[in-house]
Amino acid sequence: MTTSEHNKSQRRGMVGSYTRMWVQAHGALEDLLVDEHPPTAPRPLKDRLQVFQGLATFYLKYLQIFRSLEAVYDQIVHPQKRRMVRHVLDGVMGRILELKNEMVELEFSEFHYFDDVLQDLKLTPEDLEVPIPQYFVREKMRVLRDRQKMLAHVMAKGGHIEQVEQEVSVQTMCLEEAVRVLQVCERARQGRLRHRFMKEIRQAEEEGSQAKSQTPISTLDPDQAATCIQKVWRGYSQRKRTRRERLEEMIFLGMVPPEQQQQRPSVAQLKAQQVETTRRLVQEENEAEYQRALVSIKESVRAVDGPDLRETLQEQIRQWFIECRDATGKFPDFPNAEDGGSTAIFAQKTPDQVAAELAAKEEEKKRKDNINKDKKGGKDRKDQKKDKKRRSKQKKGGKEEGEEEKGWKMPPSNFLPTVVEGNKMYKDVWQGRDETQNFLQRFDAQLVREEKRLEVEEEVRVQVDELMRQEVKNLKLAVDREKGKKKKKGKKGGKKKKKKGKKGSKKKKKKEKDLTADRTLESLYEELVLEGFLIRPLNIKLSEYIGEFSYLGTTLRQADIEPMPSLSDVRQLIALYGILPLGSQSVHQKAPLMKTLLLAGPGGVGKRMLVHALCTETGANLFNLSPRNLAGKYPGRSCLQYLLHMVFKVARQLQPSVIWIGDAEKTFYKKVPKLEKEMEPKRLKKDLVKVLKSVKPEDRVLVVGTSRRPFDADLKPFCKVYRKIILIPRPDYASRLVLWRELLCGGGARLTPNLDLSSLAKVTDGYTQGHILQAVRQVLTPRRLAQQTTRPLTAEEFIPPLARQDPVYKEEEEAFKMWYGRTPLGKKRARAAKAIEEEGESGKDKDKRGTGRKTGKEEKSKKNNK
């Protein structure tokens, strides 16, 4: 087999595998849509646990479909198939966000645990990870590269990059750390001097020893010497074999990690990467060919079929004129463009029906005017009698005929119609389509011709409507004799419309003024970069935020213990609340609108890292409006408003954008400390609320605040601005174990049995990711890494750098819990818990009372029998 034939067979296998994945995803989606739209309307559910189980099941199933469709869209090369997959993919993403919002409103908590549901569906915790679509960044790679070049050019033009980095490094070093650095340097200098001195002494001793003659030591008998050598060698070889077997057994049992090998990709991995790059190139080629075909095929359809379509439409409309004239005795009014024009005529309706519809619309307008007049007056007597009957029924405890039962019902969805439409398109177009001959997966010309024919029909229809509308007017003028009266009526109507237009124009004047109307976007961008408000985000992916799944969440909640969320839960929320809405325009417009997000937690848990990951995964711009960055810039109220206008204008024009406010609690201080009064941290408090009102659903702009001391802020205004709050805790044991392993491997360490990671994870309880990372960096110096072959790493080496840092104590963790309990969502959860307890107690009291009544009746019956 030649290389070309081999590559063709591989590509055929790849196409078949992703096609099968696509078919399976739509099969699962169809089953899920049947559950979403049952044939009979379900009754409202009253059991809260049952409602959550249903929502969690839907959520996990949609998540699996989302993962499959994302892989299909990322790897499939057919341009028309990719568009259909993208349509369904956006709908599934939005539906996942809706289900998550429903679970939050049901349980009054941002964190949910699916241990039992995972077990029922036979899934693993890894299936809970929210996949991030690759097209968020890949499809706008050129735009991002141009933006990075422009940002680098502007920053180089300002020439303040190195100064900022030096200032940050000086500010972050405390006094104790500076003293320790000086001590290390001084001890190293003294050590070098002592080494040089001892080296000279050693050389002098060696020169003196060489001058003396050495006499041989007493020799042994050859048999004794051989026995001695055998004894030493056998002992050494046996000990070595025993250690190796023990290590193999421990690795097999999973008690010791396997020895780290050289991280070189295998042949299969290299081949997979090569195939992936070639598929990207094929995608671009097929897409470019498809775009060219859209233009050429549309021009050919317009040139060939356009005249015939125009003639047939004109003949049909003229025939309709004659039929309406014969049926009603006059020529009909031609429908307006807002009503659909000639499409309303040929919607399988007779001329009488069309004329009746047009007359009905006029009657509806009159009815609305009469209804508005009636509303100004009092209620009719009949309505008052009906209200009295309803009130009397409610007092008696009876239900009305149209009254709904109490309970939970699935609210209407904005994304289910999109999913249903996409699934129907798949069935109608692609499910039974034979593509065995389309080996290269190029576009289907027949489908393109059908689409463009509809577009050409619509264009021709608009042109024909204008002509026929004028023709109807001419016919009416020729037939009707009362021309003057109609002209006067038309003039009166025109005057009224002008008055209405004036009223509407007054309302439009209330819009905000554009303070930078005379400036270009490039100049605003350059000013924000030079002033340090638009910064370059770090290249950090969300997968680099290491954390493990919480395996005891459901168990603790069943025991009425609220568990602390895990870092895996935090990673999922960032993907759901930040990355998915910012990455997709259609998802952001229809999903529950979220303008702000607060990341609260102790220092070192990775809040800033998550902000940079948001920008990296979505290709968003990063604006820094932290109080420290605002200090001394744009003084005065008017200048601050001008700055906020600039930031949000550039953020909208270059969306998606993330506006980061570090130390967000300082903006809402209860009392400003004396040391920070010059910085004026509360400058943004009033203007930020006003600016956030101008953010619309079509604006992919997210304000992200980070806070390490949220309890220092005034709670009410703080929570009004930041509606969505994510509390980030310190890592638990499982997360610390994974964190130690990943950081050590990433730093170049060799994991041997001498390095007890389990003990390290246990000892570092209370330390954050930042503490662990700093300890790893201090220990894994280049010199220490070079000594690993002779002196393996041990857990004791990491204790001294950890001891120099302060962990997160229980008091601080309890302060965060207490603060989160006073937030709106925390209060709702506390009220719900109290209501459940009261219902349980009332149920017990009823049972006791019921048993007492039964015993009283039994006693009375006994007395009567006696």
Image: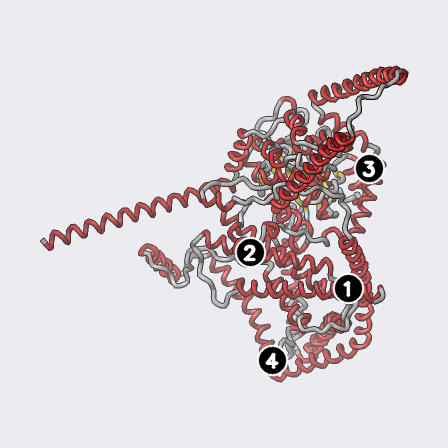
Q: CA distance from mark 2 to mark 3?
A: 52 Å
Q: Which mark is residue 11?
A: 1
Element on which disc 2 rests: loop
The earlier-in-sequence mark between 3 and 1 is 1
Real-space CA distance between mark 4 and mark 2, rounded to the nearest whole angstrom: 57 Å
Quickly name the residue at label 2: 122
Color scheme of the displayed model = secondary structure
The amino acid at mark 3 is Met
Amino acid marked by disc 4? Thr
In this view, the residue in front, 314 or 520, is: 520
Q: Nearer the viewer, residue 731 or 205?
A: 205
Instruction: Tell me the CA gap for discs 3 and 1.
Output: 45 Å
Q: Earlier in the sequence, mark 1 or mark 2?
A: 1
Dot 4 or dot 3, earlier in sequence: 3
Give coordinates of residue 287: x percent, y percent.
Answer: 79, 62
Q: Mark 3 — residue? A: 155
* Label 1 SS: helix
**Type of residue at label 2?**
Lys
Q: Which mark is residue 70?
A: none
For disc 3, the neighbor class at 10 Å (few under 14, some 14 to 19, many from 20) is some
For marks 4 and 1, give the CA distance: 55 Å
Give the Cα distance between marks 1 and 2.
32 Å
Tag in front: 4 or 3: 3
- Residue 561 appearing in the image: yes
What x and y, as percent, mark residue 370? 50, 63
Closer to the camera, 857 or 723? 857
Q: Residue furthest right?
A: 211
Residue 468: image quadrant is: bottom right
